[in-house]
Every structure is written in C-alpha cells, then in structure tokens.
Image (cartoon, rainbow, N blue to C red):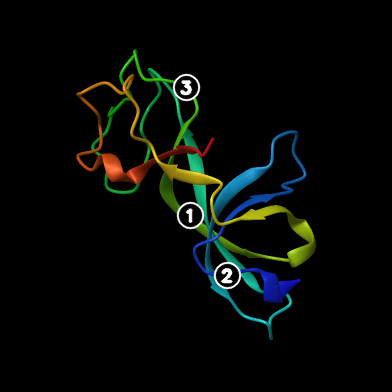
C-alpha cells in the first residue's frame, strides 16, 4: 500500500530483469498513478569506472574495493506500488567497513552504502 511507504525507506523494485533495482524513497504522492519516487542505488565495483554526474573522466574504484557496496548515481524515477518487492527502513546503512580502502574516488565516505546485517 502507498500508505506503508515513507520517505527515507529503502526499496527493492522489480525491474523486469534478473536482479531487482534498489534505492531510497524520496517522494510519496498518493494521487499519482506512479506514486513512489525512488533515488536509485548502483553497485560500486572494483576497477570499474565510478560514473556519476560531474565526475572527471576515467575516475575508477580501487582494484581492492570490497564487494557489496552501493552509491547514489543521480537517477530517480516514479514507480507503481505493485513493482515494490521489499520496503524496509533498515535495508542499507552507511558502509563503515574495515576492508574499505583509504583512497576512494569519493571524498565523502558517507555516500557509500551496504546492506544492513
């Protein structure tokens, strides 16, 4: 139900692909046919380009970057409630991991998330 969705909640969304999309609710509009606004998370992958609007060309995640980390990359969409697989306020948290490299493409480590366990 739309009423169960709150701004700030984390979601998994059926994308029609093998893997669901994940993100955070940024808006709820009960009047809309696509009432849930979601800011998308994207995986951070070792050695891959860290593509985010405003990034300098060629910026990459370190080769020793751990798996299972995500960041916002600037995209958002409104979706139907029926596409939501999971709504959970505690699905992700800021990644504060001992295996995090000290040199990252992002100055703010508070912008990197991992699944809460």
Mark 3–mark 1 distance (CA, rounded to whole Å) = 22 Å
- Mark 1 secondary-structure assignment: strand
Q: Which residue is mark 3?
A: 67
> Camera-side residue: 30 or 78?
30
Mark 3–mark 2 distance (CA, rounded to whole Å) = 28 Å
Q: Position of residue 28 (x, y in %)?
A: 59, 75
Mark 2–mark 1 distance (CA, rounded to whole Å) = 19 Å
Q: What is the number of the mark on residue 83?
A: none
Give the answer, above or below, for where 75 lies relative to 93: below
Q: Position of residue 86 (x, y in %)?
A: 70, 51
* Identity of the residue furthest to the front in this view: 117
Q: Which residue is mark 1?
A: 75
Q: Which residue is mark 2?
A: 6
| Point 27% across, 39% down: residue | 109
> Camera-side residue: 12 or 21?
12
* Res 34 visible: no
> Closer to the N terminus: mark 3 or mark 1?
3
- Mark 3 secondary-structure assignment: loop
* Eye-nearest disc, 2 or 1: 2
Which image quarter holds the N terminus?
bottom right
- Mark 2 secondary-structure assignment: loop
Give the answer, above or below, for where 68 lies relative to 87: above
């Amino acid at each position: 139900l739309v009423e169960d969705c709150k701004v700030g909640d984390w979601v998994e969304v059926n994308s029609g692909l093998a893997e669901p999309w994940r993100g955070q609710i940024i808006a709820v509009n009960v009047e809309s046919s696509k009432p849930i606004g979601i800011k998308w998370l994207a995986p951070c992958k070792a050695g891959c380009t860290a593509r985010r609007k405003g990034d300098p060309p060629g910026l990459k995640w370190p080769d020793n970057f751990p798996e299972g980390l995500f960041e916002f990359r600037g995209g958002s969409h409104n979706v139907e409630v029926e596409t939501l697989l999971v709504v959970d306020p505690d699905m992700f948290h800021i990644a504060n991991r001992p295996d995090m490299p000290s040199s990252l493409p992002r100055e703010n480590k508070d912008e990197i998330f991992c699944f809460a366990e």
